Structure formats: structure tokens, C-alpha cells
Amino acid sequence: MLQNKQQEIEFFDNLANEHEYNVFTDEANQKIIDTVVSSLSLKNGAQIVDMGCGSGVFTSLLQARGFECVGIDLSQKLLRIGKSQTRNIHFMQADVETLPFLDNSIDSVMLSCLLHHLPNPFLCAKEVFRVLKPQGKFVAFDPNRLNPFMYLYRDRSSPFYSSKGVTPNERPVLPGELRKIFSSVGFEVASQFVDGLTYRYVASDTAKGLLPIYNTFERFFFKPRALSYFRSFVFTVGQKPK
């Protein structure tokens, strides 16, 4: 299956008409960036391309920490918001399955909650491998299908699935499947499971009422190591060999 690009563009362009795309709390955003910086072993001034950057929330947080950032996304309207709110970040419209970068030219890549929008992430994995320099790293973060909340609310096989606020391409990911895909193109890959990524809002009116309960569970319930595989978000981290 291939991603329907036009559906993605229309969905996120419509979001841009209302607000920037910033679904996590400030605390969660900082935790995501902490995990990204740690996973990529980034040093001050390092180059990072934020793929699926939206309105540039994570791109700007990385820039504020001293990194050289480029943001790419399919939605011109979200990119326009990013350009209006930040300086010294190059935002460009591009498709992660056909990247506009030379081979072996990028230091590091962040896939910002992007892979779960791709019915088959293989083309994206292949392109990320192509553009990264030898020993370059990528990190991706996505909703984890092993998490009961993500399965019940966002997986189409669930009787409680809600299609509100998602594109037809979207579904939570299985960590093992992502590792296999990125390993198949040449990466050395591992998974990290992160808790405490609380939401600012959700689209579904029903889920809005349950959001405080979800956020409380997210902060405390999955902290024990024995439950780490069921945390709501999985970070897939890979390095290109020499």
C-alpha cells in the first residue's frame, strides 16, 4: 500500500486553518526533544532534518538548543506557520519517500510522529538510509500499538476506534515491524519506549472527556520497567554503518 499524499495534505492544511499543529503538552514536547537529543548523541551545532515537521514545534525546540535545523513537510500551510514563527530555520515542502537531498549528505534525521502515517514505511526507510552520512543516525517516534489506549482508540480493528482527527493513512505502529523494515535497508536498529507523553487536546469529543484520565495513566501507570513495552510511544533509533 502507498500513502495517499493528497489526503494527507488536505487534512493538515485544514488543521493549519485553525491553529499550529501542537498536540502534546509543553512537558511532553520537552521530553520528546530530550529523548531525541539523547538517542542521536547530538552535539551543539549538529545538523538535523526534522521530517514531518508540521508547523515546526519540534524543529524550533531543537534550534533553541543550538542545533542547525531543516524542517520538511507535505503541508504548505503548516510550513507557512513555521516560517512565520521562527527564524534561521529552512522549511521546505518535500515527501519523505522521495527526499530532495544528495546521497550521504545529512548528519541526522528526526521522523516526527510520521511513520504511522505511512501504510508501508519501507520507501521512507530506504530514503533516510540513502541521505544519511555513514554512521549518521535517525530517530522516529510514533504511537505504540502495544499500548492498550492507542490500540482501543486508534487501531481500526478496535471496536472503540475513532476516525476523528486522523487521516485514512494513519494507524499505531508495531515496534518489531518497524525494526525489521529499517534493518532490511541496512540500519542497526533498536526501540525505546517512553512514558509521560501527555496530550494537550484530542479531536474526538468523547475522548476529550477522558483525556485527564489518560494523561494520569500516562504519567504513572507505565513507569515500571516490566510495563515499558506497553508505553504509549515507541522511539525507533537507527544508525547507518560506516
Image (cartoon, rainbow, N blue to C red):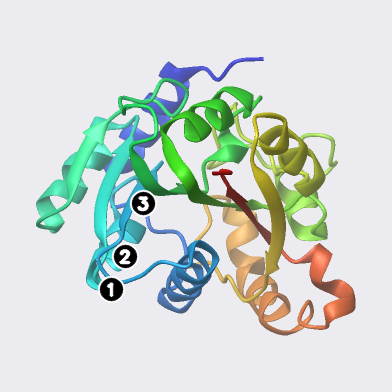
**Where is residue 180 drawn, in percent x and y?**
77, 37
For the point 47% across and 43% down, the residue is 134
Q: In this orientation, which residue lies closer to the viewer: 134 or 191?
A: 134
Q: What amino acid is at disc 2?
A: Leu
**Where is residue 240 drawn, in percent x and y?**
56, 43
Q: Are marks 2 and 1 in contact (CB under 8 Å)?
A: yes
Q: Secondary structure at mark 3?
A: loop
**Where is residue 190 drawn, in percent x and y?**
71, 55
Closer to us: mark 2 or mark 3?
Answer: 2
Q: Residues within 10 Å of mark 3 (few under 14, many from 20)?
A: some
State which quarter of the image contains the N terminus: top right
| Residue linked to disc 1 | 65
For the point 51% across and 71% down, the residue is 38
For marks 3 and 1, give the CA distance: 21 Å
Q: Residues within 10 Å of mark 1 (few under 14, many from 20)?
A: few
Looking at this view, name the residue that lies furthest to the front: 242
Closer to us: mark 3 or mark 1?
Answer: 1
- Circle on res. 21: 3
| Residue linked to disc 2 | 62
Q: Secondary structure at mark 2?
A: helix
